[in-house]
């Protein structure tokens, strides 16, 4: 078994707690669906947000999904000129037998433009 990283990102229209939690929850559900893992398989998850998101920690969405024992951390992205605003990113480390090539990264909404190469587009 290996520890593999699964990348994901999404955006929100504005910084509101309900929107951030909904978008993060949707992203995490899509990542689980695409890669077939359960909370017990997760080694840890790291979340980042752009500086324009301050209403809630995105990790709260994972807790609401039942990731109660998963180690979670939230960080602020560095401020890069012309970077995508209102963006939530996540790196989930899972224990899996899948190869790197079998991992499916998930990018939703405006974040789809970030890493088309990882999405096979």
Image: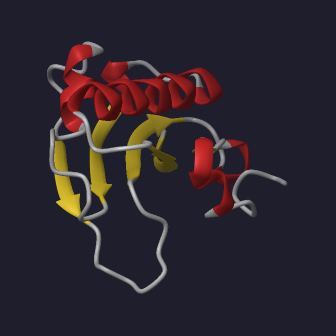
Q: In this view, does 76 lie above or below 24?
A: below
Relative to 41, 115 lies left or right = right
Q: Which residue lies furthest to the bottom in this view?
A: 81
Q: Which residue is located at x 54 percent, y 32 percent?
A: 31
Q: Say if 62 sits above or below 66 in the image.
A: below
| Residue 57, x across and y down, in percent | 16, 41
Residue 89 visible in the displayed image: yes
Query: Which quadrant is the C terminus positioned in?
Result: bottom right
Query: In the rendered image, is residue 107 in sight?
Result: no
Q: Where is residue 86 in the image (x, y as percent from the top left)?
A: 38, 55
Looking at the image, residue 48 lies above or below residue 51: above
So how many labels did they put on this image? 0
* Quadrant of the image occupied by residue 103: top right
Q: Residue at x 67, y 60 (%)?
A: 113
Instruction: Choose between 48 and 85: the one closer to the eye.
Output: 85
Query: Going by the image, does 56 lie left or right of 31?
Result: left
Q: Which colour scheme is used?
A: secondary structure
Q: Does 66 sit above or below residue 71?
A: above
The answer to whether 101 appears left or right of 48 in the picture is right
Percent coordinates x, y for residue 55 in the rendering:
15, 42
Q: Which of 18 and 8 is in front in this view?
A: 18
For the residue pair 24 and 31, the one nearer the viewer reads as: 24
Q: Which residue is drawn at 21% across and 36% down?
A: 59
Residue 15 falls in which quadrant of the image?
Answer: top left
Residue positioned 64% across, 28% down in the render: 34
């Amino acid at each position: 078994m290996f520890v593999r990283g699964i990348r994901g990102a999404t955006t929100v229209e504005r910084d509101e707690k309900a929107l951030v939690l909904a978008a993060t929850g949707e992203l995490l559900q899509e990542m689980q669906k695409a890669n077939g893992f359960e909370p017990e398989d997760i080694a840890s998850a790291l979340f980042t947000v752009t500086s324009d998101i301050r209403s809630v920690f995105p990790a709260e969405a994972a807790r609401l999904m039942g990731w109660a024992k998963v180690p979670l951390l939230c960080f602020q992205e560095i401020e890069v000129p012309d970077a995508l605003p209102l963006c939530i990113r996540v790196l989930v480390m899972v224990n899996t037998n899948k190869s790197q090539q079998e991992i499916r990264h998930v990018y939703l909404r405006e974040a789809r433009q970030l890493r088309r190469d990882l999405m096979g587009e």
